[in-house]
Amino acid sequence: MLSQLLALLSDGRFHSGDDLGEALGVSRAAVWKHMKKLDDLDIPYSSVKGKGYRLHDAIELLDAERIGAELTHSIDCLDILLDVDSTNSWLFERAPDHLGKRYAVLAEKQNQGRGRRGRQWVSPFGKNIYLSFLVTLPGSLQDQEGLSLMVAIAVERALTKLGLAGIGLKWPNDVYLDGKKVAGILLEGRQTQPDFCQIVVGIGLNVMLSERDAERIDQPWAALRQYQPQVSRNRIAGVLIDQLNSMVDDFKRDGFEPWVKYWADRDVFYRREVLLSGGNEHRVGVVKGVNRKGELLLQTERGMEVVVAGELSVRPVD
């Protein structure tokens, strides 16, 4: 019933308790109890005597039918969750029961959304895209070199299809809009059989963030509605899943090698001096692109170095 209540309130206008109760087939007291559940989801709303209830911000709830209408490549499963700790964790737990399937799960809110290097991914209710996508790939986990970069390219291609310009890529798997981070990617995998592995691809994509939401973000950020105020979350989700599904097929067939130049042409740090850091490691060098495995090519004072993706941070040298 909470989902139905949110659908009624999604326009951001006032709705009386009587009208909500009639629409839901419950009493005004039951409506009030369900409204209190919005506090648990951290959804700001107002209650005004004589007017009723309204959300502070209108929201577009995710809808499987509208998302499915955007797909040109079929997938096996699509789930939409109201509230979850992490879409990646949720799907990873269920992965063994879906060997060989393409399974997408989206959530309206994550309580423990995760990015690379153990960072929190800010995940307020009903504002952004929190997507995890399960695929089964031949070979070992070590054979999937370059997949994270291919996922970033899939995000870039989705945003371009949506009409956004100024999309850039940052090694190993971040996506930038107008020089600021708009999406992050986290891959988690397990070896299910000697000849197959399962990968859960997690994507967090900023669509709309308030100043309050952004207080927890420690780097320049962008959100799609800053550039396209009317862009639909459901269209974004559908186009993104479709591009990701297609890109996995490309990766299975040809690997990352055909995309080396494509990546370099969109690399926000290509031919720029950067600081590479992680743990006790610190290196300064000039980015020279990536190789066919998706490893970073860094020109340092010691010569050309090849950097394998890991718990590393890449930042421009000021």
Image: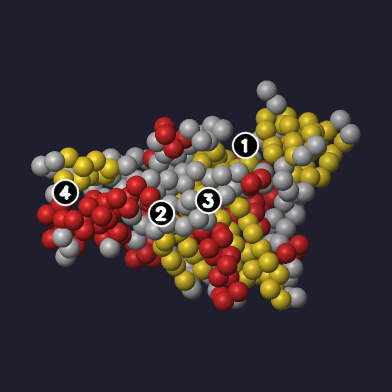
Q: Secondary structure at mark 3?
A: loop
Task: Name the residue that disc number 1 marks.
Answer: 268
Q: Give the alpha-carbon distance from disc 3 to disc 4, as whole Å.
A: 32 Å
| Of 262 and 235, the residue lying toward us | 235
Determine whether, in the image, residue 299 is placed left or right of residue 205. right
- Neighbours of disc 3 within 10 Å: few (<14), some (14-19), many (20+): some
Measure the alpha-carbon separation of dots 2 and 4.
22 Å
Of circles 4 and 1, which is in front? 4
Of the image marks 3 and 4, the number of the one nearer the N terminus: 4
Residue with the mark numbered 3? 112
Q: Nearer the viewer, mark 2 or mark 4?
A: 4
Residue type (three-letter) at the residue carrying disc 4: His
Q: Residues within 10 Å of mark 4 (few under 14, many from 20)?
A: some
Distance of label 1 from label 2 (alpha carbons) = 30 Å
Using the image, tell me which numbered label, if any, was put on residue 108.
Answer: 2
Query: Residue 150 vs residue 74: left or right?
Result: right
Percent position (x, y) of residue 44?
Answer: 32, 42
Quadrant location of the C terminus in the rendered image: top right
Q: Nearer the viewer, residue 282 or 178?
A: 282
